[in-house]
Image (spheres, rainbow, N blue to C red):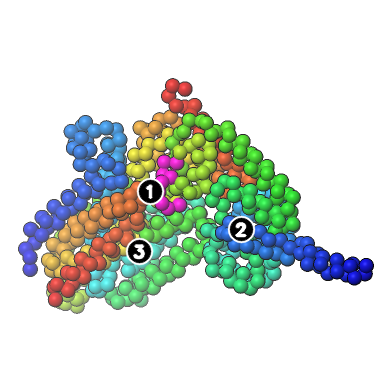
């Protein structure tokens, strides 16, 4: 197994590079020289505008969103003891999407989209948890089945909303569903939430490692399984809710980043969680930079890029590790 | 002599039978043939509904597609699904003898099936401002309002020519037209809106892009720094240009050239387009007056 701290250091370096790249690359010729000018206070108004008001918040939002998705995926994979778990498996993104699309369809102010998405995400979380718990003790299987079924329900509602909406609303709806970091939102909720999740989850690292091997075993070893599972579920759901609220439903990052890291550094949650935050953040930042430069000045949906980048890398790691 | 009369009658038979027959070419180059002007018409796009009302042929409408909201009376007509999901069963049940469709706005397969069932389909796809006149003429013929169609087409063309003449020599002013704010979307040079801009002496800063309605990186808009930013007003009063107002250093913001146009009329190729065009030319004229040194 590769040593931990060098890996974390390397990932942190990668994160810095990806953020730097996001700042100096774009559809206009504002680049590294402009960054130097901004730092020395000699930049033109336009350079400051592009770097500080457009690219900086956008790349931070991408980083925060990617970090949250990867964290949430890692936590849910432990909680559900299921390698297919991703941040959306329990229906959180579906609930958020229904909230957001309703606002768009009713023609309400676009400022209401994020709060509605957040409400939808939390509502879905509570619904799934309430249902899974209604019959007494819940098991990971019960939780995941409930989540998948609720997610399917949201999927049907999304199709219904799309088909009932006037054509003029469709571009906004589709881009929301495909995920878009450039929605102009502030990056702070995502970054702050990343910090909160890491601060709460890292002290639980040892217990999470035991839980990952199975609930029964954990109980025998004196881990308070119920409380731990509650905490993990709450953290993962909040992380997903904030991520979806910031940038819509961006797939792939949450599923694959934790697996990629497990293949490289093993399944120690104390290293895996911060590593997932760094790699998820870097990957999404990089993907968003590509999304806005490949066919500039036009833009691609960022989810397309995350998958195109991630699939070959993941497959390579998977088959190399055999 | 009797023989001659019989011969004359025989010769004129095809003419008599063909007296009501109509044949026009639609915007996609297809021939649309009717044995007589249509009596039961279904319209699948809002601009076509407007054209039918302009021709005074609304009595022939049996149903309209979703979003046909102008003129007011059109909202009372029976509805027939949305542009994307045509209800073939309902359309056939109304026994139309003509369907007016919007080539790029309606799904194509159901239209082909309608034709296979023997229902003639006219496809409208105006890509030039002048083509609205072609639509008026063609629909006039198809709906037995030939003269009215010809007259409306003439009126349209002469008003268009007048607006063009008035603005052709005006100084060129750079314009960003925003069709959608979240994500930011604009139109390229092929779009009718872009041609309207040119008619008024504006230059669409994104005319060269390849797709009809490209989705943009906001910083590209800032880099172009157009003199005018335009959008259609939203019915709920939300300002679609709000995001740009925060950037006080933009030329358009500095000069107060973030302007909203009346909704729909620039987007719908009917005669109302000319009102939209006039409003657009006025807006650009105001923007020219705000140039420094004026």
Q: Which mark is residue A92?
A: 3
- The mark nearer the N terminus, 1 or 2, is 2
CA distance separating discs 1 and 2 = 33 Å
The mark tally for this picture is: 3
- Image point 73% across, 66% down: which residue? B35
* Residue closer to the observer: A294 or A8: A294
- Image point 20% across, 75% down: which residue? A215
Quadrant hosting residue A30: top left
| Letter of the chain that mark 1 sits on in the rendering | B
**Residue B292 point in image, percent of width and height:** 43, 24
| Letter of the chain that mark 2 sits on in the rendering | B
Residue B207 magenta-drawn? yes
The span picked out in magenta is: B204-212
Question: Which of label 1 and label 2 is nearer to you?
Answer: 2
| Letter of the chain that mark 3 sits on in the rendering | A
User: Mark 3: which secondary structure?
Assistant: helix
CA neighbours of label 2 inside 10 A, class few (<14), some (14 to 19), many (20+):
many
**Residue A219 point in image, percent of width and height:** 18, 75
- The quadrant of the image that shows the N terminus of chain B is bottom right
Q: Which mark is residue B216?
A: 1
* A237 with respect to B193 (left or right): left
CA neighbours of label 1 inside 10 A, class few (<14), some (14 to 19), many (20+):
many
- Image point 28% across, 63% down: which residue? A308
Q: Which residue is mark 2?
A: B26
* B137 with respect to B185 (left or right): right
Give a yes or no on whether discs 1 and 2 share a subunit: yes
């Amino acid at each position: 197994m590769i040593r931990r701290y060098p890996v974390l250091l390397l990932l942190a370096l990668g994160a810095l590079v990806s953020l730097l790249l996001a700042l100096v690359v774009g559809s206009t010729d504002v680049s590294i020289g402009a960054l130097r000018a901004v730092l020395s206070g000699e930049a033109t108004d336009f350079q400051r505008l592009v770097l500080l008001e457009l690219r900086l918040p956008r790349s931070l939002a991408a980083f925060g969103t990617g970090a949250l998705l990867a964290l949430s995926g890692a936590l849910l994979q432990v909680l559900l003891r299921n390698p297919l778990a991703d941040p959306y498996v329990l229906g959180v993104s579906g609930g958020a999407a229904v909230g957001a699309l309703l606002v768009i369809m009713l023609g309400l102010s676009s400022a209401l989209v994020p709060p509605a998405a957040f409400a939808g995400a939390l509502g879905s979380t509570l619904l799934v948890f309430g249902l899974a718990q209604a019959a007494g003790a819940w098991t990971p299987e019960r939780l995941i089945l409930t989540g998948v079924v609720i997610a399917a329900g949201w999927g049907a509602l999304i199709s219904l909303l799309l088909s009932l909406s006037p054509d003029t609303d469709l571009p906004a709806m589709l881009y929301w569903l495909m995920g878009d970091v450039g929605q102009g939102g502030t990056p702070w909720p995502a970054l702050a939430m990343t910090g909160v999740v890491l601060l709460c989850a890292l002290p639980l690292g040892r217990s999470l490692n035991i839980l990952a091997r199975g609930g029964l075993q954990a109980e025998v070893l004196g881990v308070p399984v119920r409380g731990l599972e509650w905490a993990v579920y709450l953290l993962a759901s909040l992380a997903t809710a904030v991520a979806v609220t910031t940038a819509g439903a961006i797939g792939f990052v949450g599923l694959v980043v934790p697996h990629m890291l497990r293949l490289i550094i093993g399944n120690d949650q104390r290293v895996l969680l911060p590593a997932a935050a760094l790699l998820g953040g870097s990957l999404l930042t990089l993907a968003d930079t590509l999304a806005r430069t490949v066919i500039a000045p036009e833009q691609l949906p960022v989810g397309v890029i995350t998958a195109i980048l991630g699939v070959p890398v993941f497959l390579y790691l998977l088959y190399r590790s055999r | 002599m009797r023989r001659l009369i019989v011969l004359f009658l025989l010769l004129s038979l095809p003419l008599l039978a063909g007296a009501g027959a109509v044949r026009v070419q639609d915007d996609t180059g297809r021939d649309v043939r009717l044995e007589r002007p249509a009596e039961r018409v279904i319209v699948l796009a809002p601009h076509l509904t407007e054209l039918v009302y302009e021709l005074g042929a609304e009595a022939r409408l049996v149903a309209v597609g979703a979003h046909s909201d102008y003129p007011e009376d059109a909202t009372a007509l029976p509805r027939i699904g949305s542009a994307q999901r045509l209800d073939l069963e309902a359309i056939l049940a109304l026994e139309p003898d003509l369907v007016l469709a919007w080539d790029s706005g309606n799904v194509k397969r159901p239209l082909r099936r309608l034709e296979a069932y023997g229902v003639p389909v006219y496809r409208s796809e105006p890509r030039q401002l002048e083509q609205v006149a072609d639509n008026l003429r063609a629909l006039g013929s198809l709906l037995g309002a030939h003269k009215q169609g010809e007259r409306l087409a003439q009126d349209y063309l002469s008003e268009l020519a007048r607006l063009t003449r008035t603005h052709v020599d005006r100084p060129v002013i750079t314009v960003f037209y925003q069709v959608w704010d979240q994500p930011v979307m604009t139109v390229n040079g092929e779009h009718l809106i872009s041609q309207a801009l040119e008619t008024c002496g504006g230059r669409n800063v994104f005319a060269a892009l390849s797709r009809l309605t490209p989705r943009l990186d906001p910083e590209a808009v800032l880099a172009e720094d157009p003199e005018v930013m335009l959008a259609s007003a939203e019915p709920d009063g939300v300002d679609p240009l709000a995001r740009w107002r925060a950037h006080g250093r933009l030329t358009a913001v500095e000069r107060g050239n973030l302007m909203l146009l009346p909704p729909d009329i620039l987007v719908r190729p009917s005669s109302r387009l000319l009102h939209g065009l006039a409003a657009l030319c006025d807006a650009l004229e105001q923007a020219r007056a705000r140039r420094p040194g004026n």
